[in-house]
Amino acid sequence: MPIREQVSLKAFNTFGIDARAQRLFELATLDELPQALAALRQAPPALVLGGGSNLLFTGDPAGTVLRVALRGLRVVQADADEALVEAAAGEAWDPFVAWTLAQGLSGLENLALIPGSVGASPIQNIGAYGVEMAERFESLQAVSLADGRPHRFDAADCGFAYRDSTFKRAGRGAWLVLSVRFRLSTRWQPRLDYGDIRAELRAAGVTAPTPVDVARAVSAIRRRRLPDPARLGNAGSFFKNPLVPAALAARLKESEPDLPLYPLAAADGAVKLSAAWLIDRCGWKGHRDGDAGVSDAHALVLVNHGSASGAQVLALAQRIQDSVQQRFGVRLEPEPVIV
């Protein structure tokens, strides 16, 4: 039975927090699923662990930790215009993006180099450089951890929103994602207007970019701005970009003329602000409390310089939240799951 006891989770979370699992079950094949569900019932509550790139351990998790290690990539169907592809939940996201590009398929190139697993991508509705995963999503297969029943979710079932989904709102221990399907195109429609993609392509001498060129440009930008978790523990962007009413955005823009605003096509006229800009303006970039700190390259990234505990990282995050709210009247919301 693929279960171990008293296992360090330091290697299984990108923050590098040395939490410990009382029981760890690594699900490598679907044949092991009945055993995995039985193990979760024997020692609840359950924590489903994918790539560990979007969580912060503030202590040792209770119950059974289920690490998803399912593998497999395939083209389900294809025609002259598009293809339906499927990836097992345990596949790493960035290699999956590279695989789709190697098949001549576009749609995920703006999401290159995002850490984590394919199975976690719909839970968080990951996004970057003007594209959200939900735009390419077709369906997923999951099982209920409450009763073990399988269920197929299409896009309407998933309740996708900005860095949110039905699965995230249901809470950890509700669903186990087994595989995800994406509908991708053989006829490329580039998305180049977000961030510095065009400038990066120009600097590389690319005048007629392909999807692979865009993936390389996005990866280069991300490598410059975001520390490598293998060298400096982090979970990428720690806070969501806040969505605020248009009236508040206008007032902030009047007092802070260089504040970037991103109006959304929403019925309520909401405006997205840059969390990184707000944090930087409050003076947090490069700040350090012991081994818990803020990246000196990107104010949105909290880091573990070596031996910080999750509680220390969370305390720093809360101080940042308080200072941004005090100065701008905006409450930042963490992206990672706090365990």
Image (cartoon, grey):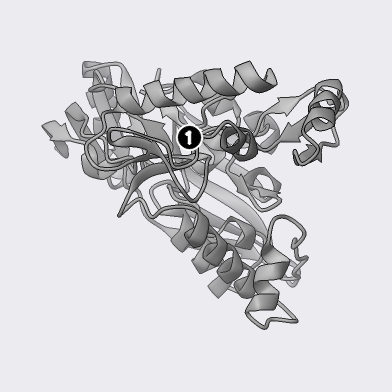
Of 152 and 90, the residue lying toward us = 90
The location of residue 2, given as percent across then percent down, is 16, 39
What residue appears at the point 29 percent right and 42 percent down from the top-left corner? 305
Residue 267, placed above or below residue 17: above
What residue appears at the point 61 percent right and 63 percent down from the top-left corner? 109
The answer to whether one can see residue 243 in this image is yes
The location of residue 31, given as percent across then percent down, is 29, 43
Query: Could you say whether the residue bearing mark 1 is in a helix, strand or loop?
Result: strand
Mark count: 1
Residue 326, placed above or below residue 35: above
Of 267 and 185, the residue lying toward us = 267
The location of residue 111, given as percent across then percent down, is 59, 55
- Give the quadrant of the C terminus: top left
Q: Is residue 253 left or right of residue 104?
A: right
What residue appears at the point 22 percent right and 17 percent down from the top-left corner? 43
Which residue type does callout 1 highlight? Answer: Ala
What residue appears at the point 49 percent right and 40 percent down from the top-left corner? 285
Few, some or many C-alpha atoms within 10 Å of disc 1 (few <14, some 14-19, many ≥20)? Answer: many
Of 272 and 134, the residue lying toward us = 272
Q: Is residue 116 left or right of residue 274?
A: left
The answer to whether one can see residue 144 in this image is no
- Give the quadrant of the N terminus: top left
Q: Is residue 112 left or right of residue 27?
A: right
The location of residue 235, given as percent across then percent down, is 42, 41
**According to the image, label 1 marks what residue?**
142
Q: Is residue 337 left or right of residue 199?
A: left
Image quadrant where residue 173 sits: top left
- Name the residue at the left extreme: 5
